[in-house]
Image (cartoon, helix red, strand yellow):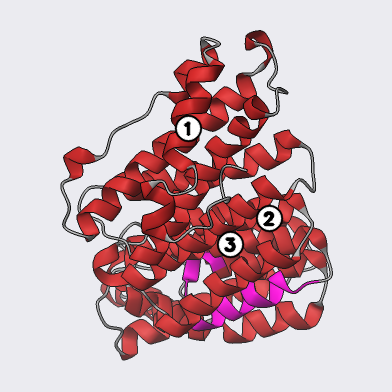
Amino acid sequence: MRTNRTRCNPLTSKLGRASAFVALNLVLATSAIGQTTTMPLSTIEAASIGGTQQTQISSFVDHWGERAASADAQAASRAQTKLLEPLINSRVSIAFRSSYSDALGSYFDSLTSAGDIGSTFSALRLAGELGTARSTQIIMDGLDSDDAGVRIFAAGRAGRTFRTTAANGPALPANDLTSLINKLASITKSSDDQYLISACVQSLGQGCNLPSKDFLAARALCLAAMCDAAGAQLTSGDSDLESRVRIAMLGSGAATNSLFQIGEDSTNAAVKSAVALGADMISIALSEVINGTMPSTDNRDLYISLVQSGESLLYYALRENAELKRKPVGNVQLTAFADLLQSGKDRDFRNQAALLLGAGSPIVTEFGFNDDRFVN
């Protein structure tokens, strides 16, 4: 008996395969919902974060946060880099940073609970880029760490917070920014760790670049705290001169740059601190000349650099003071003390510097310094 076999219609077969292909892709697409592995620029730069964008952020953090906690060091490092990527964008928005910081909450908690150095550094690295209330607290905690390396790294991330805020706007309350500045200032007064103090001075220097239009109080507070810290270190005599000069130069360089910036303002208190640092830098060399202990012209490069930096800072601080008090800026003259020292004209240096900084001088009188503050 002959048996009829079912014959396949070529068209039906093709349609079946096409349907299976569509179904397979639908399954894959469905399984991929919520799996955001790359953050869209439109979300990173968004002025406000909507529901869909929030889902993208949460999914991205879940995906890479889980991998960042992996026992595989290489995989964890790659994931941590991916978590940083959205923040390394010159147009990252305040809204994104705020939402991203919130989404990272559980990840930060896991890093904190881990308690090891690697986790602590990972948290601090992210925190500096975020510049939010949560990230600032992480940095503050790092500054209180028992580990010297963590404290120094946290100080550096504070500086990064200032840069992030200056470039992309504030994603944290003004009080938190002030607290961070005051914390750095407090450390410079209480610590005897020169490396930590240097890190704090450098970070405060970053804060001196906050735009005064939106951050005048914070910018001025950074300038005052940095100059006060650098001046205290320079005049303390608690360490070798080179270490003290290095910190003073860090502060004076950042302060001069801040005061030099066109269109940026400061405050009377900050300018007074800048004047004091500049004058202190000159007075160190002046004391050596008065006491007859200034090295020969072949061995005084350190003093020459110190004075040169100090008189430059003093010039721009006095110009800013004149502008604040509506006085003629042209009356402020740039001194040439470093040139006098370099050429061995110590007597001229002594006479001119003492006239500028001594008891009863306009600088001492106008800013209310003690008569023997700079010349004694």
Q: Residue under circle 1? A: 353
Who's the residue at 45% across and 68% down the image? Answer: 221
Residue 29: x, y in percent? 41, 78
Callout 2: 10 Å neighbours few (<14), some, many (20+)?
A: many
Q: Nearer the viewer, residue 196 or 224?
A: 224
- The region drawn magenta spans 128-145
What distance separates the C-alpha of mark 3 from that of mark 1?
39 Å
Name the residue rendered at 30%, 62% in the picture.
211
The numbered mark, 3 or 2, whose residue comes first in the sequence reads 3
Name the residue nearer the viewer: 24 or 309: 309
Q: Which of the two labelled residues, at mark 3 and mark 1, occupies the earlier sequence position?
A: 3
* CB-based contact (under 8 Å), mark 3 and mark 2: no
Quadrant (top left, top right, bottom left, bottom right) of the C terminus: top right
Q: In the figure, is residue 366 to the left or right of 254? A: left
In the picture, the disc for residue 157 is 3
Type of the residue with mark 1:
Ala
Q: Percent x, y for residue 209?
A: 38, 56
Q: Amino acid at mark 3?
A: Arg
Q: Which residue is mark 2?
A: 197
Callout 3: SS:
helix
Residue at 52% x, 48% y: name it: 277
**Element under disc 2:** helix
Q: Which mark is residue 251?
A: none
Instruction: Give the amino acid at mark 2.
Output: Ile
In magenta segment, residue 129 = yes
Residue neighbourhood size for the residue with mark 3, other residues' Cα within 10 Å, grouped as few (<14), some (14–19), many (≥20): many
Residue 133 spot, x, y in % from top left: 50, 82
Residue 259 vs 295, above or below: the answer is below
Does 94 lie within the magenta span? no
- Mark 1 lies on a secondary structure that is helix
Q: Which mark lies nearer to you, 3 or 2?
A: 2
Q: Nearer the viewer, residue 239 or 133?
A: 239
